[in-house]
Image (cartoon, rainbow, N blue to C red):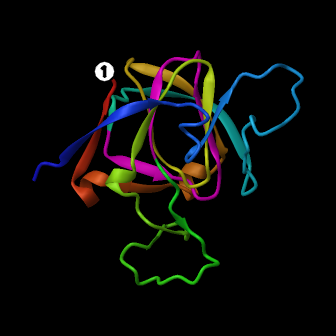
Amino acid sequence: MEPAVVKLKAIEATPETFRDFGQVIQASPDGDEFGPHDAQLDLSQGTPRFYIMNLEARPLKFSTITHHASVTQCLGSIGGGVWYLGVAKSSIVDPNVELDKKSPNILQSRSGHFFIPPAVDGVHVFKITGPKFLKLHRGTWHAGPLFKPDSMDFYNLELTNTNVVDHTTHDFKKENATVFVIDDE
């Protein structure tokens, strides 16, 4: 069976439009004191890793989405090129709340935390333009960065072991018979 194709219109990422998923961080004058316009980071669960990643062939479509339960993450393009990110709200289940672990909607990740898989209709796509970066809330589901050029460089702030021990992925094609295509016309 062919998966359903869901076309999503890209929304420009602004502090207001991206609020449910994280922060949009833009330039501020040198000497400004720390405040709510700065990235509110949680890197307390390990050693931070700040690096430049080179990505190739990331067209404007996706069928998998990932979250990190133990860390906030920052992503931005080197040079301010246009890029896209598919997102869904964090769905981590608080371990301090009584859980019905037999519920078919609550799953346990291989790293041990509980979560509810993202819904197809809960996925949004943001377009990021210019010299700004995104700070993702802890647990925000994300697909990308995605872009039109053959390759792009991005800076990434996460933990040294995020992609080894804190990388939970939901496969919409396998679990929901759905793939997403970004409509940027």
**55 drawn magenta:** no
Residues 26 and 163: in front is: 26
Instruction: Report the side of 182 relative to 166 (left or right).
Output: left
Q: Which residues are magenta?
A: 62-87
Q: Residue at x 55, y 39 (%)?
A: 18
Q: Residue at x 30, y 53 (%)?
A: 172
What is the count of numbered marks?
1
Callout 1 secondary element:
loop
Check disc 1 and give the amino acid type.
Answer: Glu
Compared to 100, does 139 lie above or below? above
Q: Looking at the image, which residue sits at the far left?
A: 1
Residue at the spot of label 1: 185
Residues 78 and 106: in front is: 106
Q: Position of residue 163 (x, y in %)?
A: 54, 49
Q: Residue at x 32, y 53 (%)?
A: 120
**71 drawn magenta:** yes
